[in-house]
Amino acid sequence: MRKNNLRHFQLISIGICLLAGTTLSAQNDLLAELEDETKDETQYTFATFKGTRVVNLQSPEIPGKGVLQYSILHRFGSFDNEFFYNFLGLDNAQIKMGLDYSPTNWLNVGWGHSSFQKVYDGYVKYRLVRQSTGAKTFPFTITGFSALYYKSQKFTDNLPHDDTERLSYVHELVIARKFGKKFSAEIVPAFTHFNVVETKDNNNDIIAIGGALRYKLSHMIAVTAEYIYQVNPNDYTHFNGNVETYANAFSVGCDLETGGHVFQLFLTNSRGVTEPYTIAETPGRWLDNDIHFGFNISRVFTLQKPKVPKEG
Amino acid sequence: MKKIFLTALTLSAFWAQAQQFATRSGEVTFFSKAAVENIEAINNQVSSVLDLEKNQFAFLVPIKAFVFEKALMQEHFNENYMESGEFPTAKFSGSMEGIENVDLTKDGKYEVVFAGTMTLHGVSKSISENATILVENGKVKLMTKFNIKPADYKVEIPNSKQKNIASTIEVSVKMNYEKK
């Protein structure tokens, strides 16, 4: 009998607790309930960098699905003794024009031509994973970039050449993170391969590690800095006869955004406008005043409008 | 005794939620009409609950789920204006006036006033908006249109963009609720 009473008492207490719980949850704010239901939804980070490039390095960004991007890249002549003779570096400017298109939100394909060594290039850029919080949490956005370059400049040595000698390749793996509203950083392991190099002592494969930072001053202006360290840089013969080692490219710049345009203005020691030449064949050094003013301009056109998932 | 308790528990739980209607796929669109361009965005991942018994409501709008005509507009909306990394949702909750007239047993159209607190871009304001509630075969739908001013919620539009973005934005809401 006593045992039975105790059991009843236990049951009643449990019942009261449960009832109290039900009533409490019903009294809870509906909004808190909704927030609780949705709090685990994955939030993806966006706009880690403004443009699809920082300066010479790729950024993790890919234009949205159905977007065509037209870009013009310029590197003016250096601030050397001939700077004014070359009309503020304009006379010996290098230019690259490019078009790229995103058939999906994670893939971008592009084509371009650069006046530096008359290089044609084609590339694919693909986002592997996005920085996110919530149900799926990941600390970085990782984007791959693989490009093929064809140097079309005529050979002048009157020796027989094969077309494959003109090819080079660059692969970049952009590992980026947005820290808060203003600051973003990326680390970019890069692999460059030249089918043919100048001497047999030179490396065909150059390993490099790039790093870039971005800090937003306002919604429309940001400052950027970028450095590409070569693990095994090649030597080259300077026109003064000295054998020198190719420099690491360092750039500082600023991003300006106005609607559909992004203007990137910067100073860099790199003269080449395409990746193999900026990463592995930059002769100029900042300390020798071999600094070039340059800009990247891009404009986007929406060819295919984003579709809204239908309610269902 | 145990059985009675369990039955009572189940019943009470059922009863407490009996008059709740909810959706996770409500639609909110907005329209901005300005000199240079019109901007429209649609979001159909809006969560909402109506509690007809307690006369309470709540809406939760994930800002990043607004889809625009151009991907870049969506980026600017999130990054420059709504700052959705910091303020990922807009919220509206409060109580309803005129909900007692709603008869779930027969089809009809009712005007109800939703009064409460709107939180947008981290700024909370008391607002009160009229909405139409439709009852169809025991199902509840809600429709309304109202205006909001970005400036009221400290969403800054720079001078250079005032020809692109209206100072008053029209918001349309369509909810198809399911009984919870």
Image (tube, coloured by chain):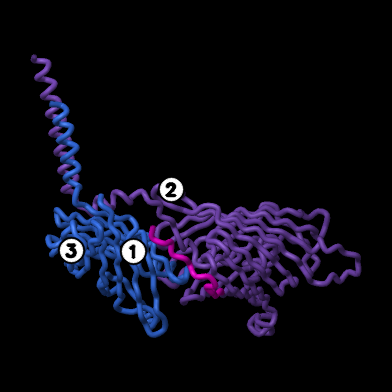
Chain colours: A purple, B blue
Q: Amino acid at mark 2?
A: Thr
Residue A106 point in image, percent of width and height? 54, 58
Can residue B88 be seen in this snapshot? no
To the question of a shared chain for discs 3 and 2, the answer is no
| Residue located beneath label 2 in the image | A137
User: Height in image: A57 above or below A129?
Assistant: below
Q: Is residue A311 left or right of residue B101?
A: right
Q: Position of residue A159 (x, y in %)?
A: 91, 66
Q: Is residue A26 above or below residue A284?
A: above
Q: Which residue is mark 1?
A: B27
Q: Position of residue B180 (x, y in %)?
A: 25, 49
Q: Secondary structure at mark 1?
A: strand
Which residues are the magenta region?
Answer: A298-312
Check the image and report above or below for A34 versus B11.
below
Crowdedness near tag 3: few (<14), some (14–19) or many (≥20) residues, C-alpha within 10 Å: many
**Left of B34 or right of it: where is A117?**
right
At mark 3, the secondary structure is: strand
Element marked by disc 2: loop
Which residue is tagged 3? B116
| Protein chain holding label 2 | A
Q: Which is closer to the viewer, label 2 or label 1?
A: 1
Q: Amino acid at mark 3?
A: Gly
Q: Are marks 2 and 1 in contact (CB under 8 Å)?
A: no
| Number of the front mark, 3 or 1 | 1
Q: Chain of mark 1?
A: B
Amino acid beneath label 1: Glu
> Badges 3 and 2: C-beta atoms under 8 Å apart?
no
- Residue drawn at x 18%, y 32% as measured from the top left: B6
Q: Nearer the viewer, residue A208 or B139?
A: B139
